[in-house]
Image (tube, rainbow, N blue to C red):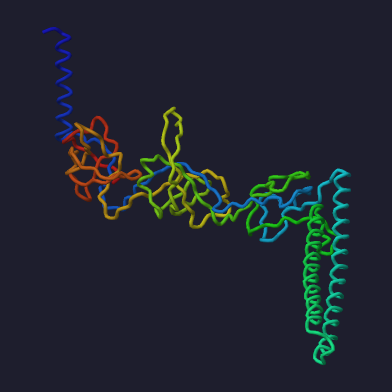
């Protein structure tokens, strides 16, 4: 036999002797173990999300005018009805201003004319009724015909109709005057000389953004301030559609990674009905959908638009037999693990159910309380003596 062949045969024999020594009475292999135990298992969908206000209010300019410098700053807490901005009349072209003044003058003249017409109609009605009243006794004495009295009574009715028309014309003239004054942002109808318009907060909340920070002329409808109630924070997280089908309204939320040490709790409000396509960092197109939840007690330092880590609980079971996920490995198409029995590793095929965060449900092939090997190394084999650490 050649020398090289003898070396190979000798090496194989040595390995066999070492294995037999370990399986026999030799030194034990130190392994880390954990006990299979009945536990509460939660299956979660974990993704990054962001916070948003439950109700966001955009305060806009009610009229066209010159916006003054903002009276609030971002982060200010304001009460409902508080002034957040003021608008003054916008400077007009002199010809436009002259036309507006002329319209007001004409409207005031029409009001005066309508008032005079109404007074004249009242006097005519009074006189017509007196004429009819004077002739009624003459008709009763036979000195005047009934037809003549009826003509005077008809004249009184016509005078009453003219009075009603004059009153309506007076109301229309006053409305026209009000409209003319409103066109120049005046407040003469209120009896004051202040021509500014105060823009007030619609709700009690916090100013998120001041959209117009400089003094300038803005048209009606221009957004000025965004505000919201910080106590009504929502969490929006986009998940894969195949995960979203397991999420239901009321599912529990656990929020971490927001900057604080505490884990925040909440629940799912709804899953949006429409999905969207998003390209992952690996360049793969994914169908995702937004899940919207609400926090039970958001901390004051957590604001709108913050990034958070969200875990959505889609299933939870109690008294479930679980083992750490690091104890399991695939072999011959099945899940296996090494149980520790009488200080020896025992290879077992197990049936696996739901998988939680760090722990996995075992539905068959293992009993509660059995130690299992974590992170089984290449030296761990069926029947090898082991020295358990941990568990």
- Residue 224 lies left or right of residue 172; in this view the side is left
Q: Position of residue 262 (x, y in %)?
A: 48, 52
For image coordinates 26% across by 50% down, the residue present is 37
Q: Residue 142 versus residue 282: which sits nearer the camera?
A: 142
Q: Residue 57 versus residue 296: which sits nearer the camera?
A: 57
For image coordinates 27% across by 32% down, the residue present is 377
For image coordinates 43% across by 39% down, the residue present is 288
Q: Position of residue 229 (x, y in %)?
A: 59, 56
Looking at the image, which residue sits at the far bottom?
141
- Residue 330 lies left or right of residue 61; in this view the side is left
- The quadrant of the rendering that contains the N terminus is top left
Q: Position of residue 187 (x, y in %)?
A: 81, 59
Q: Is residue 268 above or below residue 188?
A: above
Looking at the image, which residue sits at the far top?
2
For image coordinates 14% across by 12% down, the residue present is 6
Q: Is residue 37 above or below residue 387?
A: below
Total label count? Answer: 0
Q: Residue 339 versus residue 179: which sits nearer the camera?
A: 179
Q: Residue 276 versus residue 210: which sits nearer the camera?
A: 276
- Residue 62 lies left or right of residue 13; in this view the side is right
Query: Where is residue 137, by image quadrant?
Result: bottom right
Q: Position of residue 186 (x, y in %)?
A: 82, 56
């Amino acid at each position: 036999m050649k020398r090289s062949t003898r070396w190979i045969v000798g090496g194989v024999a040595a390995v066999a002797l070492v294995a037999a020594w370990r399986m026999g009475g030799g030194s034990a292999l130190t392994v880390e173990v954990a006990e299979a135990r009945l536990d509460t298992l939660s299956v979660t969908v974990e993704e990054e999300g962001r916070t948003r206000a439950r109700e966001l209010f955009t305060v806009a300019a009610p009229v066209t005018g010159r916006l003054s410098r903002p009276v609030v700053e971002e982060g200010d807490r304001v009460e409902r009805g508080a002034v957040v901005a003021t608008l003054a009349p916008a400077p007009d072209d002199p010809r436009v201003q002259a036309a507006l003044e002329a319209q007001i003058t004409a409207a005031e003249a029409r009001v005066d004319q309508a008032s005079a017409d109404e007074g004249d109609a009242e006097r005519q009605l009074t006189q017509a009724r007196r004429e009819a009243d004077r002739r009624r006794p003459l008709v009763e004495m036979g000195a005047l015909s009934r037809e003549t009295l009826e003509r005077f009574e008809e004249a009184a009715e016509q005078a009453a109709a003219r009075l009603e028309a004059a009153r309506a014309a007076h109301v229309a003239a006053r409305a026209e005057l009000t409209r003319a004054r409103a066109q120049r942002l005046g407040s003469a109808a209120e009896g004051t000389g202040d021509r500014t318009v105060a823009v007030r907060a619609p709700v009690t909340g916090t100013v998120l953004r001041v959209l117009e920070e400089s003094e300038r002329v803005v048209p009606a409808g221009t957004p000025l301030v965004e505000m919201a109630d910080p106590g009504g924070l929502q969490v929006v997280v986009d998940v894969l559609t195949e995960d979203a089908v397991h999420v239901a309204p009321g599912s529990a939320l656990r929020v971490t990674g927001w900057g604080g040490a505490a884990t925040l709790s909440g629940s799912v409000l709804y899953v949006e009905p429409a999905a969207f396509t998003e390209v992952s960092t690996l360049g793969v197109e994914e169908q995702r959908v937004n899940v919207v939840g609400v926090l039970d007690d958001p901390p004051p330092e957590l604001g709108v638009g913050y990034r958070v880590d969200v875990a959505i609980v889609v299933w939870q079971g109690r008294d479930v037999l679980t083992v750490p996920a690091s104890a399991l490995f695939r072999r011959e198409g099945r899940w296996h693990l090494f149980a520790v029995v009488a200080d020896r590793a025992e290879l077992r095929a197990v049936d696996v159910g739901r998988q939680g965060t760090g722990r996995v449900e075992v539905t068959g092939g293992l009993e509660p309380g059995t130690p299992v090997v974590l992170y089984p190394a290449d030296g761990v084999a069926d029947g090898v003596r082991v020295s358990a650490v941990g568990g």
